[in-house]
Amino acid sequence: MKPPVSSGQPLLPLPTLPLLIVLSGPSGVGKDAVLSRMKACGYPLKYVTTMTTRLRRPNETDGKDYHFAPTQKFQEMLKNNEFLEHAEVYGNWYGIPKSEVEKPLEMGEDVIVKIDIQGAATIRKMMPQAVFIFLAPTSMDDLRTRLKQRHTESPADFALRLHVAGDEMKQLSLFDYVVINKWDKLDQAVADITGIIRAEKCRVMPQGIEL
């Protein structure tokens, strides 16, 4: 069979627009571990660091895991409208600084933010063109085991997080994709997420982000 005859006209390059990827999921599902592995693999993204008023845990680094800030500073930034999104979660404030998202997008970089379900719903209303990925456990028993192994919550906080997680699992309709983070299969979750990003880059009609 003869190959098709070329018209001699090269294919026009498809326009590529920067993506805003929103990664969410219940507490303890492994969002930080997934992002850390993606960074270690050198995947080319701008990883946005959330600001929080909660106390830093022993294994966390300021500026890497979170921007840890006193409540007064957070409230000042909130008053000056410096957050893309903010919320009070488990008695602490969390927020995505606008500058950490807007600047890289303006420079054409793909941006990924880690956020809770409430925050993802807020961004969905503001920027529906973003790519929303829900990271899920294989089961609630799996999530319970993960939370226990963290040893970071009191019994009351542990029970609250499990209760909230049950409600959060019902919010899948807010998201475009779901990725299961299986126990000891972190690389598979990373591969699934990077595969989603590659697929979004292949859209015939790319979705631009309006800031």
Image: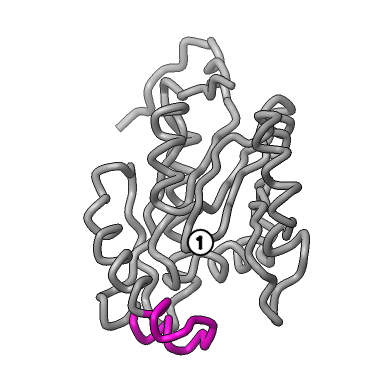
State the residue in front, 169 or 158. 158
Quadrant of the drawing holding the C terminus: top right
Up the image or down, 18 lies above or below 134; here it is above
Question: Where does residue 25 sit, x and y in percent of width and height?
Answer: 40, 59
Residue type, numbered disc 1: Gly
* Element class at badge 1: loop
Judged by its main secondary structure, the magenta piece is helix
Residue in the foreground of this view, choosing between 145 and 199: 145
| Residue at 75%, 47% in the rendered image | 73
* Near-viewer residue (129 or 87): 87
Q: Is residue 204 left or right of residue 113?
A: left
User: Residue at (46%, 45%) from the top-left corner?
Assistant: 119
Q: Quadrant of the N terminus?
A: top left
103 horizontally vs 191: left or right: right
Is residue 69 toward the left or the right of residue 205 in the image?
right
x and y, in percent, of residue 136 in the image: 34, 64
Q: Which residues are magenta?
A: 144-158
